[in-house]
Image: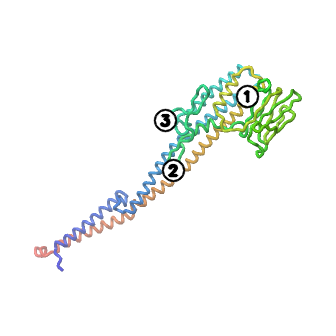
Amino acid sequence: MRLATAHLYDTSIANLQRRQQALQNHQQQLTSGKRVSQASDDPTAAARAERALASMGRIDANQRALEASRNGMTLAESALGDAEELMQQARETMLSAGNASYSDAERQSLANKLQGIRDQLLAIANRSDGAGGYLFSGQGSANPPFLDQAGGVSYVGVAGSFQTGNIDNFPLSIDGRAAWEQARGGNGSFVTDAGANSITGNPAAAWVDSGRVLNPSLTTGQNYRVDISGTAPTQTYSVTNTDTGAGVAGGSYKSGEAISFDGISLTITGTPADGDNFSVAPATNSLKLFDVLDRAISELKTPLRTNAQIAQSNSGRVRDMDAVMGGLQNARSQAGEVLNGLDGAETRMAALKQYSTEEKSAAEDLDMVQGISDFQNQQSGYQTALQTYAMVQRMSLFQYITG
């Protein structure tokens, strides 16, 4: 077999070109810090890096959704805190209205104060989220969710909560109806109230407290009526279940003495007239904050009320204000829980993003120590090949003859 000199030259040049290309590739890896710059460099590592990059993209989207939810919940929690402070002022105003020395004009002044508090609360209920929406619009509305009209304030938003739509479904708004219009009335179990005298039609001359539950297992969740008969000091009371028509209790009436039946108890105070009656109804989640304030304002503006009417009004409205404040507190605590959950989700996302970043780096980044070592080896090999070629190209018959 005969090898021509030209073939040897071509082979040496091809080898030099391959070494030069390898040296250039290693130099490019060192300058970029990437072992895999395109899929053809290492298809498996490229796919691994692409999966990590997609995971990082999803995490970034979730983090943007989380920040939007955090902004909304922070504003909502702050608004509910402002509403609680105003309701506390309203409660204190209602308590001061029970002062027996106050005149109708002074109670009118307190009613005006409550009106101002009501207007501030309405502004809070319609507070914007800063992004074109409303904090308490529920599932979204282009208009303020609470509308003040002749019959009172009504909720015109869409009940529920608007969410981000990602896997975690972070809430962006608070259900305004649940926060402002669904407090549990009365003492949480039943609601007491004074009715009109069944004989004269006049308001009751005594007042009833909010009552209490003595034995939950005996409560029926039904409606009752307490009727007062006779004249003092020999008055009696009878308790009737108005749902079944059955009498459930009775006895001598004494002011301030508890009346107990079917696992519940209530106290009537004062000197009722013959025919006065008091109702007991099961509590429902339908107490509206603005209805409570409107009723309190209306009653404070009513002149010439008896002491019993004033006492019943103040007792009932303070009870209702406590109930709606409880509803606001529940909504605020839910917003706080969401914020706590967002903090936890943010921590998990940060950890997952760190893992994905490390996974992507492990798949495509260059080990600099190994890279420098490989580059130096390629450089030494290339220099050796150049020297060898320089020696070989002089080893020919023509060089020998001319030499």
Q: Amino acid at mark 1?
A: Ser
Q: Nearer the viewer, residue 54 or 78?
A: 54
As helix, strand or loop, the secondary structure at mark 3 comes to loop
Type of amino acid under label 3: Gly
The correct choice, above or below, for 286 with respect to 36 in the image is above
**Image location of residue 101, percent across then percent down:** 77, 22
| Tag 1 secondary structure | helix
Real-space CA distance between mark 1 and mark 3, rounded to the nearest whole angstrom: 41 Å
Residue beneath the point at 55% across and 41% down: 161
Q: Which amino acid is tagged 2?
A: Ile
Q: Is residue 89 visible?
A: no
Which mark sits nearer the N-terminus, 1 or 2?
A: 2
Q: Which mark is residue 313?
A: 1
User: Is residue 290 toward the left or the right of residue 399 in the image?
Assistant: right
Q: Which mark is residue 132?
A: 3
**Marks 3 and 2: CB-CB under 8 Å?**
no
Q: Residue at x 28, y 63 (%)?
A: 21
Residue 132 in picture, x, y percent from top left: 49, 35
- Circle 3 residues within 10 Å: few <14, some 14–19, many ≥20: few
* Secondary-structure class at tag 2: loop
